[in-house]
Amino acid sequence: MKNPYLPEIAKIMDIRDEALGGRPIKTFKVVLSNGHEFNHKPGQCAMVGILGIGESMISIASSPTQKGYLEFSIMKMGKVTSALHACEVGDTITVRGPYGNGFPIDDWKGKNIVTIGGGIGQAPLRPILQYILDNRNDFGQLDIIYGARTSNDLCFKNELLELEKRKDARVHLSIDVGEPDWTQFVGFVPTNLLQVKPSPENTIAITCGPVVMIKYVIKNLLELGFSDEQIFTTLENRMKCGIGKCGRCNVGNLYVCKDGPVFTYATLKNLPEF
Amino acid sequence: MNIQKLRDEAIRAIGRKDVKYLIGYQRGSYGFRVSPAFIQTKEDVDRLIFSPLCHLSLTKYLTLEEIIPVSEEKQKASKIAIFARGCDSRALNQVIAEKGIPRDKLFIIGIPCEGVIDRKKIEARFPHVTDPADVIEENGKYIITIGDQSHEIQKEELLADTCKVCQYPNPFIYDKLVGDKVAPRPANYDDIKSWEEKPLEEKLDFWLDQFDRCIRCYACKNACPLCYSLVCILDRLNPQWVKRSNDTSENLMFHISRAFHLAGRCISCGECERACPMDIPLMKLNRKLEKDVKDLFSYESGKDSESKSPMTTFHVEDREDFIL
Amino acid sequence: MGTLILQKDKLKDFLSSLDEYTLWAPVQKDTITLFEVIKDPKNVSLDLKHQAKIPKEAVFPQTELLFSFDKDGIIKKTDSREMKESIVFGIRPCDARSFLILDPVFEGAIPDPYYLSRRNKAILVGLTCTEPFSNCFCTSLGGNPFSQKGLDLIFTELNGKFYVEVVTEKGKKIIDKTSSLFTAASTEDTKQREELAQASESKIKRQINLNGIPEKLAMIFEHPFWKQIATKCIGCGICTYTCPTCYCFDIQDEPTLRKGRRVRIWDSCMFGEYTLHASGHNPRPTRAERLKNRIYHKFKFNVDNFGVPGCVGCGRCISLCPFNVDLIESLSAIKSIE
């Protein structure tokens, strides 16, 4: 029987600063030491950690179509994430996974996709974008709505600015409070969503960000005519085992690590505690 | 103890505009159990009891974070009324002195206490009792009524161990006093003194054996009226001072740390020992430290609401040049 | 599968002759009955009073080493092939059913090798319950003080002897190894056991009808009732740590200067930091939410996920709760909410 608690060792190949300031975010590019591929689905996560400190569940921020490495975008928050932020290129960390249900991306072929992200919430949405761009003809229109508190807090800035130049994707960035060089939308992400006004016709909407933002985005999506089945989100909770056994990450009778983290609004609205 | 007098005082207390609710005792859900009661209306008052079975330390509820919903008219009220026996009043004094709760937030109904029954002792004496039971004290005996049957037991057989050596049965601090003063028992540390004389090896073996079976449920800490930190240092994970795995060495570390945090503050209510599901004699540790603080610093906790415990204060004139 | 008699004075011989197994049994220690590995069968206590330690520890210990590591990486994985088979003796029928409730949690798409290797190597020997305690309510949960469910063998104390029922092949294997100690049971023996069983069942005083509880719970999540019942609770972990069906755990790293270990330890959903996010946000900030979650987990979510309530009615949480939070009282109150 395979031991699911035994992590693999991974080496950090690259560290990129995404956001500086009080809650810094870094993207870590890691390679599993035995060379094996996760072959994960976009939306799945992994328990990332350091021996002697602990583990945290982090979404895999790169698509499975990007072979040979995994990327994790991590915000410095507590014990484990602070220790990860103190790592340098060449250090080893532990990784185990992939866990969770992931996005049903094959079911979305032929549809238009709208992703609505806030802050670090863009990280689990990024593999969707990469997967679509790597399989561009399989999908319809692609709209990326993303905002953060300030322009310094925007993740994947360079990638998104590059995407803006493409004809086959539309990027709508926002920041909460105006800044002198900022020419795009100023305001909260749910308001920007109403501004962009994506059509619900043959469209799937996926959102991730702070819980408060998710609730308002869902409210606005419903107003725009999206059905419960068309709205997807990915949740997070404190996790320890990652495999639905330690009991703590449940929302209602479902475990975020095992039955999630991806849920449709149709499922969530019937769960207590959401 | 005239229960009607107590209930009348309770009605007066909750009738005050500035009192949100009263914390008292009510009959428990079966047998000899007693439950805390959160009284807001006159009808609620009829549930109040006060008997030798009422062993709980109610002062705990003043420092827990739960906010009890109250009626519209009581939203602006600032006080909580509470029953306090001798030991409870010492806990209140200690917490007030430590600025854990302001004096003007309390309306204290003091009740001199003749001692409480140890639930473990009475349940061993009368096992499998689910029918509601009552106990009254009369002439040094307990009259126990279970259903329609009555039994008479010598008080000392069922009295809680901490009550057998209770020096302070009368409340030190109160707004109203209900009941006649009770004669205190003399200070008695004989059991601790004979324990002190035992060889070190024997004492260590005893405690290692006891803490081997601690399951780290933290009932002792949570039941203690003086363990009211929002995040207990022994619960912290960042940094982590005590590992959560329950090996004997970590368990010993937890209990010794807790005992020292209580040194000079513990009021000997005995709730920790009564709550422990593994019957670990925690009061042995606490009373030893209580005796040491008394001998070394001539200090006993909770006698007034200003004095600070010697272990929590530092004066420039102290012999040691650091807080430890 | 067969019913046999073992003379009482032969019990020590029976247990001693099975020395190739690790033996777990109830042991009297001062005023408490512990449940632990014993070397000498004469220490076995058949008095099941005050059993705050539970047989579940034989397959799910409170502290379990997951693996140890040095500064260069993982060096030692716990290997179940090295573990001896075990005999878990003296299990109350309620605790026996708890194994059946824990199994589906640790099986499934990603099986847990630590639990399963111990579980598969454990032979469960029960002891029928002739003196139910004040708060026993196993009969309200489909159990019975003489139930064989989940056990491989079950012993009943008659006068001077044990009536032994062989329930499974695993149990039979043990009897075959020690067959010289057993004699056949007579119809008189069987009749005595029946009488004891009926007497025992009638001694259970507390009952509750759990029909409709999951449906009711589905409707009352936001009800103010939860704030009221939680006011008594002081947030310790007695109910969870003495519960035979609780399984929540924490995983912690314990490093030293040059090496360390990762352990799995029991955790309690009643503790504040159980669901605390690193950001400081806590989806269950007060005891009301945590007590609510515990009751929902046992009486609704477990039913949703596995078809049975996550409770065997042993009553320990009620007897041991220091401030009288009473599960049966709470369930009755839930039933009477309009």
Image: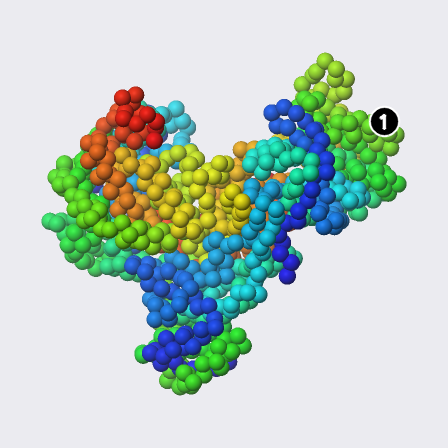
Per the image, the residue denoted by label 1 is: A165
- Residue A113 in view (yes/no): yes
Where in the figure is residue B240, as x and y percent of width and height?
Answer: 47, 39
Determine whether A177 is above or below C206 in the image: above
Residue at 36% x, 25% y is B77
Viewer-side residue, C64 vs B219: C64
Determine whether A94 is above or below C118 in the image: above
Viewer-side residue, B128 vs C128: C128
Residue flagged by tag 1: what amino acid is it?
A: Lys
Tag count = 1
Residue at 30% x, 21% y is B316
Residue at 19% x, 35% y is B295
- Asked if residue B164 lies left or right of residue C134, the reply is left
- Residue B14 in view (yes/no): no
Where in the figure is residue A35, as x and y percent of width and height?
Answer: 74, 49
Where in the figure is residue C331, as x and y percent of width and height?
Answer: 44, 51
